[in-house]
Each structure stands twice: as C-alpha cells, then as structure tokens.
Image (cartoon, helix red, strand yellow):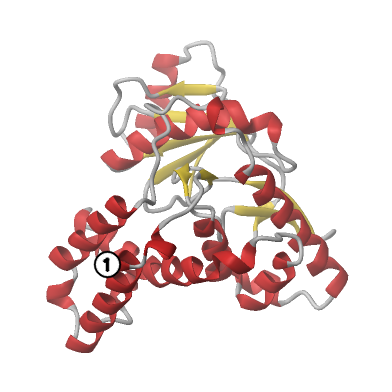
Amino acid sequence: MTLSEQYVDQIGRIYPHLSLESVELLAGGQYNDVLLVNEAVLFRFPKVPSAVTALKREVAVLSIIHPLLPLPVPEPLYVNGQNQGVGAAFMGYPRLPGESLWRADLEAIRDETILARMARQLAEFLLALHDVPLAEFDPAAVPVEDDRTSWSGLYHRIREHLYPHMRPEARQRTRDTFTTFLDDPALASFEPTLRHGDFGAGNVLWEPESGTITGIIDFGSVAIGNPAIDLASLAAGFGDTFLEHCARHYPVMPEMRPRMAFYRSTFALQEALFGAENDDPVAFAAGMAGYT
C-alpha cells in the first residue's frame, strides 16, 4: 500500500461518506505530508510525534481565529486528532487561493506600489493576529512559549546535539548569543500574544497577476508567545528591505528589534536540531552549514 493509499484509507475510516474522487500527494515539509483531495481540500498528516501535538493545538486555534483576521487562514473541517498518532492524525481544510510566495518572487517585483500593498497586508494581518484576545484560548490546549525557561531548554538541546559538530568559533558565537539573551531581563521579558511561529516564505500565499496576498497557512508552530518571532521570521524569509516596508504599518516594531535579532540568529540552529532529533540528515546539514 502506497503512502497516498494509507492516508486515503485513514480518511475513509473517519469520514466514510466523503467522496474521494481524486487524490494527489503534494510535496510536504519537515513535519507533515500533504494530500490534495478532489482538487479542493488539503489534508495534512503529521510525520513526527511533535507534529501530532502541534496539529491538535493548531486546530484549536484556527477554529477560533478563522473569522477574526483580515486574510484567509485554514478552516479545519475534517479532523482526526484526539489520541491519534503519526499516520492516523490529520486535519483537512478547503484549499486557499493563490500560491506560495518565495523570496525570489518578492525580489522580482519592481513596482513599489505592489510591494507597499503586500507589506501593508502582512503587517495588518500580524497586528490583528497579535491582538486576538488570549482569553479565547484554553491554556491547556494553547500553551505559553518563548519564556526564558523554553529558550534555556532549547539551548541545552543545542549544546547536547549540535556542539559536538560545531567548529570552536561557532560554538563560542552560539554561547555568546544565548547567554547575552538569557542574562538580559529586558530581552527575555515580553507581553505575550498569539503568534504564528513560522511566518516566512512558503507560508504566505499570493496571486502573482495582481500582486495581492491571498492567505496565510501552516499554523503548526502557533502558540501564545513573543510576537517578535513572527517579525523575525518575516525578515528571514523576505529580507530586511521588505521588512522596512512592513515596519511602516507595525508601529511597535522598533522596540522589538533586539529580540528579533536573537530569534533570527537561532533559526538555522533550530533546523539543525530538528534534523538531529528526528533523523533528518537534510535538515541537519542545511541548519549546520554555517557552523561546521
């Protein structure tokens, strides 16, 4: 039985009356496989245990925020997550319009009016997301992350799994970066908000002909945490020049820049750590490229 057939069988077990007229296994990411059903509905199946936990949180959040945001986000209509593991848990939602926006797409745009409009759309989306009332969420389902304890834990895992593979200068640079952040209360403190957690290239959809943002996908890293992570992801995914366009519509960005710089410096290490902990040599090599 192929992977697609396994997933189709699982969908059929939970939703026996759903007609599966066409099925296509799309290119997925590190955490999920993606199945396109009837050319209209996307089903995401977690590939690692941590993604199963994330899926449950994602469904809980999306069910609440779907009508509150200025851009479309996935609306979970088909869910199998309770007490389910890898290969069984899934979420299905109507496919959003548009295609993934990549940095090369953005850099090819020469019309400043289009760039300004796209920047405003993304900044206004983040402002609305970061303003969603936290009282809407069950703390047990949507935890608080990004505090000093969570970053200390990440640093411990980096030392354990990545330090043995780093050149000495890279180890020292990583040590300096983390200790400076962890020892500075001003950097480690923040007002929690709902944040996307992976707000970068690939998770923003757009319509190339009109130069319009059409939706935001993949809330697998969503949590109550530091909004500066979303801005750091935006900068890492689309570059500092586009970030400055967005800054015109996100008034409090200047005070977040020190935290943004720290978060951005950890993204490659987090990718390498994922590879080390999930036996993914491609992710490990990509993340460690600047450290070995």
Q: At x 54% / y 27%, what residue is drawn?
A: 135
Instruction: Please say whether residue 38 is visible from this viewpoint.
Output: no
Instruction: Please say whether residue 1 is visible from this viewpoint.
Output: yes
Q: At x 28% / y 75%, what residue is drawn?
A: 288
* Amino acid type at image mark 1: Phe
Q: Is the C terminus in the top left, top right, bottom left or bottom right quadrant?
A: bottom left
Near-viewer residue (71 or 38): 71
Residue 199 vertical position relative to residue 56 in the rendered view, above or below: below
Q: Position of residue 44 (x, y in %)?
A: 46, 37
Q: Is residue 154 left or right of residue 226?
A: left
Q: Position of residue 167 (x, y in %)?
A: 19, 85
Q: Is the N terminus in the top left, top right, bottom left or bottom right quadrant?
A: top left
Q: Residue furthest top?
A: 17
Asked where in the image residue 87 lies, by quadrant, the reply is top left
Near-viewer residue (11 or 268): 268
Residue 203 vertical position relative to residue 87 in the rendered view, above or below: below
Q: Is residue 157 left or right of residue 92?
A: left
| Disc 1, SS | helix
